[in-house]
Image (cartoon, rainbow, N blue to C red):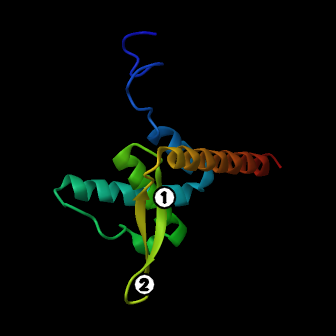
Amino acid sequence: MRESDPAGPGDDCEADVLGPYLEVLRARLNGERFEALIRAVQITCALLGDGHQAVLEVPGEGELAPDLQREYLSLMAVMITGHLDHRLVELAAPDGARGWAVVENTHPHQAREAERVWIEKQLDGIVRAGDSAVS
């Protein structure tokens, strides 16, 4: 292994999960939906970069379907933490509106199991998408 390699076996560096996570999202979502999701994330990053302490609304919420809003929150959680060990919990506001909270999994075994299940689902989705493209 060359010294310029960022991480190798036995290194203490965390594995990059964002790149593979984005690849799975791109494979699972059609181009237009993926682009809308990325635009919302870019807007959030710009807001945070301009000094906003928090972003309480999903940018472009009107153009993001509820499932894309969930994807947005998951993607932001992966970008912020560098981990897949989170889950989304649906919440009801006092006015009856629905929203989501990102909750970190606290038990390492649960996190590994959740990550394994998530990866299996994503791989299954990619295989199905590939099969339908071939048909």
Residue 110 placement (x, y as % from top left): 53, 49
**Residue behind mark 2:** 97
Q: Amino acid at mark 1?
A: Arg
Residue 109 in picture, x, y percent from top left: 53, 44
Residue at the image position 45 percent from the left and 42 percent from the top: 18
Amino acid beneath label 2:
Ala
Front residue of this view, candidates 59 and 3: 3
Quadrant of residue 16 within the rendered picture: top left
Asked whether residue 26 is in view, the answer is no
Q: Is residue 69 left or right of residue 127?
A: left
Helix, strand or loop at mark 1:
strand
Say which of 134 and 52 sits in front.
Answer: 52
Q: Position of residue 54 (x, y in %)?
A: 24, 63
Residue ID at (38%, 27%): 13
Q: Please indicate whether residue 49 sits to the left or right of residue 104 in the image.
A: left
| Residue that mark 1 sits on | 87
From the viewer's perspective, is residue 54 above or below residue 26?
A: below
Question: In this view of the protein, which residue sits in the foreground, 107 or 2?
Answer: 107
